[in-house]
Image: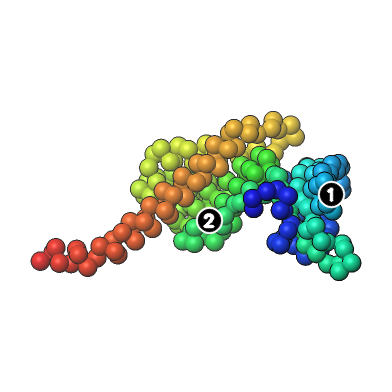
Amino acid sequence: MQSWWQLGEGFGQAGSSLALYQIECAFCGERDNWAIEHRAEKRKPNSRKVLYFDTYKCGNCAGYVMVFWSASESSGGPMGGGLHAYRVLPWPLDIDDGEEYWPATVKRFWKQAHTALSREDFDAATVMSRSALQAVTRSQSAEGNDLYGEIEDLESKGIIPKIIKDWAHEVRLLARPSAHPETDEADVDPNDARDIVQFLDYLLEYVYGLPHRIEEYRSRRAPEQSSDEE
Ligand SMILES: [Zn+2]
């Protein structure tokens, strides 16, 4: 596109009005629950072309998006139909599904921890990190009466080093008030929640990522190694 005046000309969505139902709230993921808050427009001189600058409010979480859009100049004319195109700010941040070699439960909790963080649900982020941690200890057949014991067991078996063990205990401790609340729990510090989720990433890399990569590396080198053994 050479000019913003070309927005909606020859490409875009069907119809001459904004496909609002397609727009997903960047904060809560809700679709098609928008109320217009403000509209400004700029009209091209001697033309039917109009650029719209809209602000919409999400009916679910009260967040806002700005939608810049325009219909093709011929839209709404005697032939009807037409096209329009739009750009939205902000957009939902992509959270991927994790690595295919992680256990399914770990993947699910990991994704929920990141999703909670993106929505600034810090209690949920820490609780889901703790759940993911527990799913990791179970996937490694850790033994113990509780999460504390399972973490200790993983270190004693050499599956995780001491530094990872220490941080795993921090995850456990940070999430405990949210997982088992007293009547008057203080809020989770957002920076703590972000650190804990990042730790989870490191943990998964250590427990699953590195062994997976070593395995791949070895299977790639296997033919060479057998000739070296002679
Ligand atoms: Zn929303």
In the image, which disc is placed on residue 98?
Answer: 2
Q: Are marks 1 and 2 in contact (CB under 8 Å)?
A: no
| Spot occupied by residue 217 in the image (x, y as percentages of width and height) | 31, 59
Q: Nearer the viewer, residue 216 or 91?
A: 91
Q: Quadrant of the C terminus?
A: bottom left
Query: What residue is drawn where x is 60% and y is 52%?
Result: 95
Ligand 1 under 8 Å from disc 2 Cβ = no
Measure the C-alpha gap from mark 1 to mark 2. Answer: 52 Å
Kind of residue sitting beneath label 1: Asn
Display coloring: rainbow
Q: Secondary structure at mark 1?
A: loop
Near mark 1 (Cα within 10 A), the count class, few <14, some 14-19 or many ≥20, is few
Count of numbered badges drawn on the protein: 2
Q: Position of residue 36 (x, y in %)?
A: 86, 46
Residue located beneath label 1 in the image: 46
In the image: residue 98, left or right of residue 27: left
x and y percentages locating residue 86 in the rendered image: 74, 53
